[in-house]
Image (cartoon, helix red, strand yellow):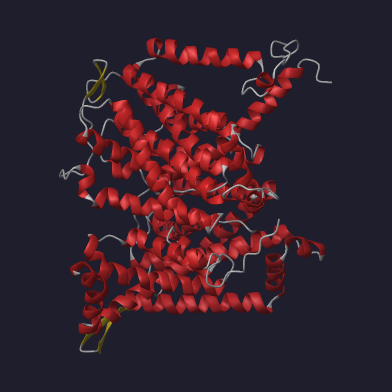
Amino acid sequence: MFYRETGQFKTTYQADMAVFPIRQDRIGLAFILLVAFAVIPFVGSDFFISSVMIPFLVFSLAAIGLNILTGYTGLISLGTAAFMGVGAYSCYKLTTFFPGINIIVLILASGLVSAAIGVLFGLPSLRIKGFYLAVATLAAQFFLQWCFVRVPWLFNYNASGAIEVPQRLVFGVPVTGALATPETRYFVCLALVVVLTWFASNLVHGRIGRSWMAVRDMDIAAELMGIRLLNTKLLAFAVSSFYCGVAGAMMIFLWYGGGEAADVFSIRLSFNILFMVIIGGLGSLLGSFFGAAFLASLPTIMKFGLPAIGVPLSGATAEHVTFMLVGALIILFLIVEPHGLARLWQIGKQKLRTWPFPY
Amino acid sequence: MGTLYAIFVDPFMQMGSAPDLLVQTLWEGLVAGVLYALIALGFVLIFKASGVFNFAQGIMVVFAALTLVGLYEKGVPAWIAVFLTLGVMFLLAVTIERVVLRPLVNQPDIILFMATFGITYFLIGFGESLFGGNPKQMIAGELGLPRGAVEVKMLGGFVAFQKIDIAAAVIASAMIAGLAVFFQYTRIGRALRAVADSHKAALSVGISLNQIWVIVWFAAGIVALVTGIMWGARSDVSFALEIVALKALPVLILGGFTSVPGAIVGGLLIGVGEKLGEFYWGPLIGGGIESWLAYFIALAFLLFRPQGLFGDKIIERI
């Protein structure tokens, strides 16, 4: 009833090609952004912001990165966590080399380092594809994780092997380090995610995104149509690794605040992000957010939500049950809707458009 | 110059000067390779018959071993526990076929792949809540597996062969031979090969895909149990095995996804290559390279032969 585009005429080509052609969608998006920027930081508790919202944002960004590679270009990667790790460690190195430069610039720059490494490990994708490629990316995962432990230069030769996040100010406000408030960190995360999502949206809706999707659907046909496979695939690896790298740097600098990073960027994290992409919906930016929201919040809900409603669970049992539940939910979602939450959302919207007279 | 010497000359000098050590390393590699090959075998069985890249094979190994030890700890005699575990693996195969595979028929490969991830997670949680997360001792002695080592004097030194490793190699060969006979000479085996060749053609001559899938997953379960026993006898039974099981993936790449001999040869190659690399070249760059060397061997190999050693030639059409 409220969600109907009757009377909204498209008079220009631009209007027809818009990402959000329906006015209600645009209002909804503006509303969500308003809530995210102006309501949550002031209403949400510190706990909610730092253990629900920030992880959600970080994982969303990583999921977008992987979605560009797997969902849009059709190259399965199991090395996401390693590329996130590259971002985190290069951000750490950059802060030691350039202490005076704005930390946000450094976080973005560390994404570029990650992109370079991503291109390097993306080279085999020209020869191999499918599951073979997935295993090839495991080489990146294990090799880079080994580097994080064994190359002391990466963590400045300190004895613990941990990343120490230094304090950095942006416009006189501490953004990283112990003094940074959850709200500031949340703002920085949110701003980065919004800007990068907008950028990704423009990429995937434009010529580059179309060539990615052509490669995904059938790479030989795409090649015959004049798409250069080398450039397209490597660009996908570069952009994907850039997003993952930024997400990794955000993860350590704005969420964890330092620590033993090598264990964080393990193969399990790679799998988790792949789940987010699949459950959210392959080839959908919105799906990346859905998947991240679902999988990032599930452990927290299990840990704190269930005892609250009277189901007593000890820490270990909760962890086991979470594992079982995640496994079962993955299977359930795949059976109910293999195209992910994004498709469910689309179906729901379509129903809403014709509601209450579907015929 | 010094670096080149350290990479290309020195390791071989070491090999030549201490041949007994080389033999020992080769043997260690072969033993590790047998275990990789066994896990890869489970993958190949399922991939051939259903086209599913079964990521859960590693966790099925852990789950089978845990069930066996768990049953024994409950007071079930060792050999009865083995048969009960086989029963559990059969139930698992039936459940997976009913709950996961059947509703997902005809979905893209990646969806089925993800579904096996779901199975993995579920089994991790299920196994941990049933048996606890602590490492357990495998009941190797009770199952009649030998202990201790044989020391053989050769090449101017002693080489130690663990009896359990010899037993593992023998049992693995026997099982592979058994599987080969089963595939080649039985009615079900022929049906399995038919399904591997073409699902549609197999369906059209009246082979029940659902039944075949249960059988194949059960066969993979048996392989998993044997692997679990062997692996558990060498170290402990714990969920750490899951990461080691990922090593089966480069083995698959090397051997090809659809080839049983490929899985075996690939497993042995990866095992030997990894141990040699770690022992002779590892110290040059700080050690611990075992964690990724296998993947690099496989990757380097893929660049020259994208379909693996024994895999079917990839023909692409538009």
Location of the C terminus of chain A by quadrant is top right
Residue at point 24%, 39% (across, down): A93
Q: Hey, which residue is sitting farthest front in the picture?
A: A226
Residue B173 vertical placement versus A327 (above, below): below
Residue nearest the viewer, comparing B248 with B309? B309
Tell me where residue B283 sits by quadrant. Answer: bottom left
Q: Position of residue B80 (x, y in %)?
A: 50, 66
Q: Position of residue B286 (x, y in %)?
A: 22, 59
Location of the N terminus of chain A by quadrant is top right
Residue B48 vertical placement versus A44 (above, below): below
Residue at point 73%, 22% (across, down): A351
Q: Is residue B88 left or right of residue B247?
A: right
Q: Is residue B260 left or right of residue A94?
A: right
Q: Position of residue B91 (x, y in %)?
A: 60, 56
How many numbered marks appear? Answer: 0
Residue A176 vertical placement versus A228 (above, below): above
Q: Position of residue B61 (x, y in %)?
A: 47, 60
Tell me where residue B32 sits by quadrant. Answer: bottom left
Residue nearest the viewer, comparing B176 with A69? A69
Q: Is residue A107 left or right of residue A217?
A: left
Tell me, yes or no, if residue A349 can be seen here: yes
Residue at point 58%, 74% (across, down): B179
Tell me, yes or no, if residue A251 can be seen here: no
Residue at point 62%, 65% (across, down): B314
Q: Is residue A351 left or right of residue B150?
A: right
